[in-house]
Amino acid sequence: MEVLQCNRKLGQLRIIELEKPTLRGPDDVIVKVAFAGICGTDLHILSGEFSHISDKWVTISHEFCGVVEDIGDNVKNISVGDRVGVDPNRVCLSCKFCRRGQPQHCTNKGTNNDSTGVFCNGGMASHCVVLADQVHKLPDDVTLQQGVLCEPLSCLLQGWFRLQNSGCLQQDSRILVIGAGIIGYLWVSMLHHNGYRNVTVSEPSQGRRDILANLETGYKVLTPAEVEAEEVEKDSELDGFDVIIECSGFPPAIEKAVSWTGRGAALVIFGCSPRNKPINICPEEIYRKELMIIGCLINPFTFSKALKLASAMGERYLSYEKLGVKVFKLQEYEEALNQLRFGIISKAVFNLNNDLFFC
Ligand SMILES: [Zn+2]
Ligand SMILES: [Zn+2]
């Protein structure tokens, strides 16, 4: 089978021929991949920013779904023929963090060690072997195309739950979403789906702002300069944003965002920022406003909840057309990355098996 691989040390991608995977043990599942996505994390890996991951060639995509083709003898949670989404992150349940209920910080598995599509071969192939505990059956009303979005939605839910727990999000909150890539669109969809209406989106790219209009939320969509022009007129403490969801990962944008927060606000740091790029924040401002800065890392036990969320959101929010997601063939990866980088599309999804296109 043909696979798309990434080497973060060389900063290169390549298509090569690999043997189709077979069951390695009794807990294995072979997934025939329908769709696999590329996300911002893959672009960060490609640019060599994640020095902790392997410098070997790895088949990319940690966001994929498909149909179960084979299962090992111990596998009970799914059957051959099931339509499934795959959680790329596993947990060990025995390290200090897992035992505290913080498996996103697991020191033995997941993002530090064995995430599928990052450390081990992922979904950009006709078939992928994973472990049974990574595989979730899709609800009947969730299409395989929507199924690809369950991984990013599971990460969003981690941010969502942490924001809810902060107590800063109120029904009448004034909310700002910074950065309108696919993650920003999904946050916008999530907020609208949950009834929040006082939302502004800040995005410098015209193309991305245009895509956002397809979601028909009625939210205000502005350039960062336009947001700044509106906010300087206000007393930020009294009328600033109550919640800012930062999806750009761009340190200067985050620094600016702090000055737009009101009293009792929360700043959710969701976008993946570069390492060793600090920002200036005055601690007195954090103290005075009781500002909450909320980090959110991957998807601890949120994947199954994301399936239900995808089912509830449906085509109203998750249609590829509305979200600016485009489907490519594996061989078109260079074109896909270019369209992604130039903001022509919000996300590139690859169809790995023709016969699963409409399942
Ligand atoms: Zn991702
Ligand atoms: Zn652990």
Image (cartoon, rainbow, N blue to C red):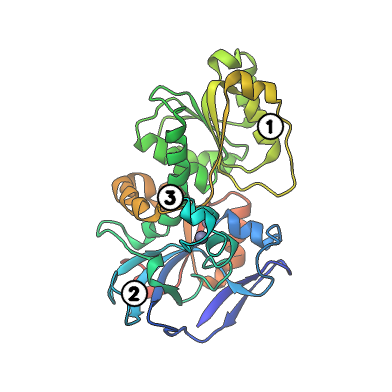
At x 32% / y 82%, what residue is drawn? 73
**In the figure, residue 9 lies in which quadrant?**
bottom right
Q: Amino acid at mark 2?
A: Val
Q: Amino acid at mark 3?
A: Leu
The amino acid at mark 1 is Glu
Residue located beneath label 2 in the image: 68
Mark nearer the N terminus (3 vs 1): 3
- In this rendering, the answer to whether 201 lies above or below 260 is below
Real-space CA distance between mark 3 and mark 1, rounded to the nearest whole angstrom: 26 Å
**CA distance for labels 3 and 2:** 22 Å
Is 171 situated above or below 103?
Answer: above
Left or right of 312 on screen, residue 187: right
Q: SS at mark 1?
A: helix
**Label 1: few (<14), some or many (≥20) within 10 Å?**
some
Residue 238 percent location from the top left of the image:
55, 13
Against 188, residue 328 (above or below) is below
- Sequence-first disc among 3 and 2: 2
